[in-house]
Image: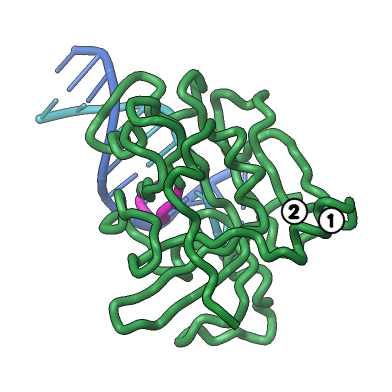
Chain colours: A green, B cyan, C blue
Amino acid sequence: MPLAPSIAHQWYDRSAKDIAPALIGCTLVRQFSDGMMIRGMIVETEAYEPDDPAMHAYRGKTPRNEVMFGPAGRAYVYQIYGLYHCLNVVTDREGIASAVLIRALQLETAPPGIELAATTKLERLAAGPGKLCRVLRIERSLNGTLLSSGQALWLEHRPPQLQQQLDTGQITLTQTTRIGLTKGVELPYRWYLSGAAAVSKR
DNA sequence: TGTAAGATCCTA
DNA sequence: AGGATCTTACAT
C-alpha cells in the first residue's frame, strides 16, 4: 500500500469554519526524530475566526498568537492552565488570524511506552485537546511547525472509504457550540463525528 | 511589578 | 464543585 501524501498547504487556505468540518476523518501523524510514529483519526474540531471574541488574536497580534497571522498549514501550539497543551492548524490567508483546534483523535494503535490499564480504553486516550497533546508529546517547541511529510507533524486526507460513507450518509457530522469558553459561547463552531467513541464530550 | 483569567482534566 | 499549575496579557 503506497504512503498517503500529506495535505498540501494550499488546502488550508480557507476560513477556519470551512476547514474544521473538513478535517474530521483526516489522520494526524506525529513523527519523532528516531522515526517512531503515532497516528490517529481526527474526530472532533473547533473553528476560531478573526472576528470571534474567543479567538486568542481577537485583540491583535502578540508573541503568543503571531503564528496564526502567518500562512496556512502550520501548527499553533499553546499551553493552557499551566498543565496542558493544545494543537491548532493555522488556516486562511497570511495576515488573517484563523485556526482550527484539534480536540480529539481516534488512535490507530496504542502508543509505545503507554500501558493501557484495564480501565483505560484506547478510544479515550486522546479524547480531548490536552489529552491528545500529552499522548503525542506535542508541546510549545512545535509551535510554528510546517505540517508536511517528514516534519514532526502532518495531516493526511480522509480515506476514500470514509469519504464514501460520508457522501452516502452512513456516517454524519454533528455541528454544535464550542466547549470550555466564556466568550463566543453561542457560535456553532464545533464539529464531531457522530457516535465516535473518542469524542471528548457528547 | 501585580494580578486575573484561561480553547483542560481529574478527583471527590 | 474544586484544585492543580503557570503563562500571558494588561493594568498599575
- Which chain does the residue under circle 2 lie in? A
Q: Residue flagged by tag 2: what amino acid is it?
A: Leu
Looking at this view, is A167 or A131 the one in front?
A167
* Relative side of A117 to A155, left or right: right
Quadrant showing the N terminus of chain A: bottom right
Which residue, given by chain and number where applicable, does mark 1 sit on? Answer: A171
Residue in the picture at 29% in, 77% down = A33
How crowded pointer 1 is (Cα within 10 Å; few <14, some 14-19, many 20+) is rated as: some
Residue in the picture at 64% in, 46% down = A22
Residue in the picture at 81% in, 53% down = A166
Q: Is residue C5 above or below residue A125?
A: above
Closest to the camera, between mark 2 and mark 1, is 1
First in sequence: mark 2 vs mark 1: 1
Tag 2 and tag 1, C-beta contact below 8 Å: yes
Q: Residue flagged by tag 1: what amino acid is it?
A: Ile
Residue A80 part of the magenta-drawn span: yes
Give x and y (percent) for residue A152. 35, 66
How crowded pointer 2 is (Cα within 10 Å; few <14, some 14-19, many 20+) is rated as: many
Dot 2 falls on a residue whose secondary structure is strand
Give x and y (percent) for residue A91. 46, 38
Q: Is residue A71 above or below residue A45?
A: above
Q: Which disc number belongs to residue A193?
A: 2
Residue extent of the magenta highlight = A79-88
Q: Is residue A170 above or below residue A173?
A: below
- Which chain does the residue under circle 1 lie in? A
